[in-house]
Image: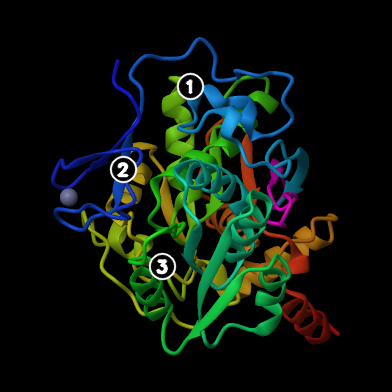
Amino acid sequence: MQLWQYHCSRCATTAPLTTRAWRCSTCGAAWGLTHPTSTPVSVVSSPGEGTLWRYASVLPVPAANAISLGEGQTPLVAGELAGHPVWFKLDFLQPTGSFKDRGASVVVSHAKHLGVETLIVDSSGNAAAAFAAYCAAAGMTCHIFAPASTSSAKLAQTRAYGATITLVEGSREAAATAAQHAAEEPGTLYASHNWHPLFVEGTKTWLLETWEQLGRRMPAICFLPVGGGSLLAGAWRAAEDLGVVPPCLVAAQPAACAPLVQALVANAQEVTPVSPGPTLAEGARIGYPPRGQQLLTILRSSHGWAEAVTEVSLVAALRLLWRQGLFVEPTAALGAAAFCQVVARGIPLPDGPIVIVLTGSGLKAPDIVQTLLTEAQ
Ligand SMILES: [Zn+2]
């Protein structure tokens, strides 16, 4: 039986699951994971477990090693958008207020078991808070590298969990480079959510849950916010684990930073880096996602596409969600905004459940909420 193992999709280099190399040691590409070839009896290995660890049989970390704060098992609620019945996956109802807790729980559990003392992460938002929280729960040190332009409000939650924060002048990429250098120290592990393959194994549980909540069937189509793409890559992995046809997957990106949209329009096999423009969807300002090639393959294979969401659409969708009692931050409204744009263009929708994933709480962005409410008056 093939066991869990790192592999490079570009040059076929492999490494054991215990490696601390954060990318392929031969060619520098993002690691993928080879997963066990024998299908478990059930992906729901612990039906009584109320966290994502109910799916431990398809996770690369045993449940006995779990560092858990009660992540996963978020509600799937019926609602309406653009005159259509839809399902909202409330993934902003997680311990730190975003879907990133799914990946952070699995990566931190893995790192703790490896004996890592300090986790090194680059992020300016929800991933920083998620990793800081799970490191606190695990009794590990967390060192966050964030762009100097990051608002102090956004980092307050991370600081509250006890993480060390280093602000780096320049772009988001400059913060990543500084983090990668820091991770050369012994006892550390670089755990960027954009690079670490175990992060996706955690995020895939959103669709395993949705499949259960729909009575063990897949949605027909899903609209997801996509920056680094862990939600999208996770959806593909969930369908693989279940051995079913994946839903049509639509990646919603802000028009100001839409590298996947541009690559699909150009019919390209690789993503070309873009320079992110200003957008309220700051969580999706990733101009060059490390897993870009894989994300393009997933979108094409699922018969999906990438939708460029305008700022006008984003704000309109945000207000529609708020008025339904769904208090999300701007990045989290990308999927809803993409759906509204698709309906407005008259694009036919497949028969079956439509799922819109809501990824981050509105409590994360009080300044933006206040500004939008003032503008509306
Ligand atoms: Zn390689």
Q: CA distance from mark 2 to mark 3?
A: 23 Å
| Residue 186 covered by magenta stretch | no
Residue 162 x %, y %: 68, 68
Q: Nearer the viewer, residue 355 or 27?
A: 27
Q: Report which residue position mark 1 lands on.
A: 242
The quadrant of the rendering that contains the N terminus is: top left
Q: Position of residue 185 (x, y in %)?
A: 36, 66
**Precedes in sequence: disc 1 or disc 3:** 1
Q: Which mark is residue 294?
A: none
Q: Which residue does the numbered mark 2 point to in the structure image?
A: 32
Which marked residue is nearer to the observer: mark 2 or mark 3? Answer: 2
Q: Position of residue 318 (x, y in %)?
A: 71, 65
Tell me the CA gap for discs 1 and 3.
Answer: 30 Å
Residue type (three-letter) at the residue carrying disc 2: Gly
> What is the crowding at mark 3: few (fewer than 14 residues within 10 Å), some, or many (at least 20)?
many
The answer to which of marks 1 and 2 sits earlier in the sequence is 2
Q: Does 95 appear in magenta?
A: yes
Q: What span is colored magenta in the figure?
A: 82-98
Residue count near mark 2 (Cα–Cα under 10 Å), binned few <14, some 14–19, many ≥20: many
